[in-house]
Image (tube, grey):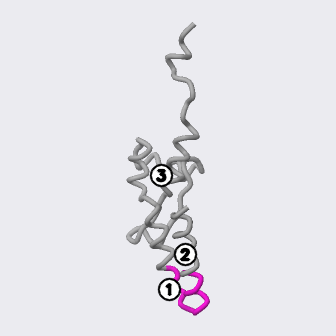
Amino acid sequence: MKVWKELEARIEEALGYLEAGAGDRARAVLQELVEGESVPEAEAALMLGVARRTMQNWRQEGTGPRYFKIGSRERGGVRYSRLEVRAYCRERRSSVSTAELREP
């Protein structure tokens, strides 16, 4: 619950900046929030045990874990939520091993 309260507080902070007309500051707060819970393409590929090129192919095909882009390539580029990458792994986890399938 502590994480959710912190998340809510940061979103409220960003909304306050927006209401005050400080859009740049609001964007900075939200970007900091997102970057703290996201990983770049290379790290997501390591988490999944695939090549970066595989991640790029999945994006083009519309498969793979969900991603988002922040700014230019130099300022962040493609990023993945740690939660999305873990969920993608869980969805593809087999409940039965191949050895079990071969047993009579």
> How far apart in space, not on screen, are marks 2 and 1 (Cα)?
18 Å
The residue carrying mark 3 is 56
Secondary element at image label 1: helix
Residue 78 — which label?
A: none
Depth order, front residue of 62/24: 24
| Residues packed near mark 2 inside 10 Å, few (<14), some (14 to 19) or many (20 plus) | few
* 2 vs 3, front mark: 2
What residue do we see at 38% from left, 47% from top? 46
* Coordinates of residue 14 in the picture (x, y in percent): 55, 81
Residue under numbered circle 2: 9
Give the side of residue 76 with respect to residue 7, left or right. Answer: left
Going from N to C along the chain, the mark reached first, 2 or 3, is 2
Judging by the rendered image, the residue that carries numbered circle 1 is 24
Q: Callout 3: few (<14), some (14-19), or many (20+) C-alpha neighbours within 10 Å?
A: some
- Tell me the residue at 53%/16% (across/down): 100
SS under mark 2:
helix
The residues colored magenta run 14-27
